[in-house]
Amino acid sequence: MKLIRRQLYQVIEDNMFKGKAIVLVGARQVGKTTLFKLVLGVKSGVLELNCDDPEVRSLLQDANLNTIKMLVGDNRIVMIDEAQRVKGIGLTLKLIIDNMPDVQLLISGSSSFLLQGQLNEPLTGRKFEYHLYPFSTQEICADGGLLQAKQTLESRLIYGSYPDVMNHLDRPRDILINLSGSYMYQDLLSMEGIRKPALIEKLLVALALQVGSEVSYNELGRTIGTDSKTVEKYVDLLEKCYIVFKLSALSRNLRTELKKGKKIFFYDNGIRNSIIQNFSPLQLRDDVGALWENFVISERLKYNHYNQRYCNTYFWRTTEQQEVDYIEERDGSFSLFEMKWNPKKAKVLVPSSFKSAYGDCEYTVITPENYWQHLV
């Protein structure tokens, strides 16, 4: 298996032994454990704890300081995998940080609604937290150069960029079908109150078919046979499982702007295509535009996070059908992006009503001919 160096590798290395836990979150199978093990390398004094093990969970749950000291022993680094499985893990980790300052904690978890809910309050000011995604274009370029990124573009549009998929391009469908099944959101299904997993599967199909389009929770509810509040709740949980993410409509100045619009994208094209069971080549598809938009926006999200470019993100549309696919706002300035799979249809023109409402701004059309310039 080929190991592509992750952009967070050096970030984690640089923040070791700074008096804070290092927390790595993200979807299942994006390589969190692999990344931590690469950072650990041949370091000595390492204790690895996997919370899938019931005995490990029992030792960490509601543990007192004496028990923790006996567990850690003389080790200077403690890696805790699948930490969200331990009830009250935040308080246990707080004990280690406050009372064992020479010990470096490395913590991974796959479900933010479980992990962050337990960590945020106990570990306030005591952690560095990072999100690991499937392989980014920037990581692929750094590993094999621009040629590799271009050569794998069509594959990534269809099969995505999960590490296991990119390392086994002879059988990506089998891997994706396994990933996109209940395995990916089994923590969600185990939650109290989630009694109709079939609804989640129907919702995922509906969302996959509407990538790039505005969605209505009322309409989604009618489609899958439930109410809008249930749809909203499930979308929120799917976000916290790192399967989808939302873009809200930018609305501040114009009466004609859509004020409550939202679009929902998938973190990975392969997961999206697996949900609707469509792995057809690009030339045979009628959803290439949606695939391209989902790909570029998700890659831009990775780029901003890994390069610590903090910004607000939106799309924009008016009742007069003027629209912008994707907008980033940084320090009061707007950068506008249009995604065009066909370069011949690209028009570099800021909508007049946007310009009159928000002033001059940077406007970029991203096509297969120039996409890497905005993702690397």
Image (cartoon, rainbow, N blue to C red):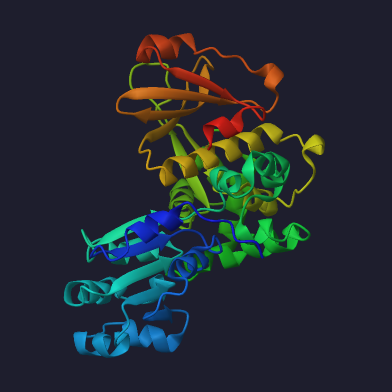
- 203 or 36: which is nearer to us? 36
Q: Which residue ends up furthest to the left in the rendered image? A: 99
Q: Looking at the picture, how far across and down is residue 127, in whole percent?
A: 27, 61
Q: In this view, does 154 lie above or below 176?
A: above
Q: Looking at the picture, how far across and down is residue 315, in whole percent?
A: 47, 29
> Which image quarter: residue 149?
top right
Q: Which residue ends up furthest to the right in the rendered image? A: 284
Q: In this view, does 164 lie to the left or right of 338?
A: right
Residue at 77% x, 61% y is: 171
> Which image quarter: residue 340?
top right
- 342 or 322: which is nearer to us? 342
Q: Is residue 150 left or right of residue 59?
A: right
Q: Looking at the picture, how far across and down is residue 1, in whole percent?
A: 66, 65
Residue at 63% x, 43% y is: 145
Residue 195 showing in the rendered view: no
> Which image quarter: residue 330?
top left
Numbered circles on residues, count: 0
- 124 or 42: which is nearer to us? 42
Residue at 54% x, 17% y is: 321
- 16 or 333: which is nearer to us? 16
Residue at 57% x, 22% y is: 365
Q: In this view, does 348 lie above or below 14?
A: above
Residue 313 showing in the rendered view: yes
Q: Looking at the picture, how far across and down is residue 312, in whole percent?
A: 37, 34
Q: Is residue 69 left or right of residue 213?
A: left
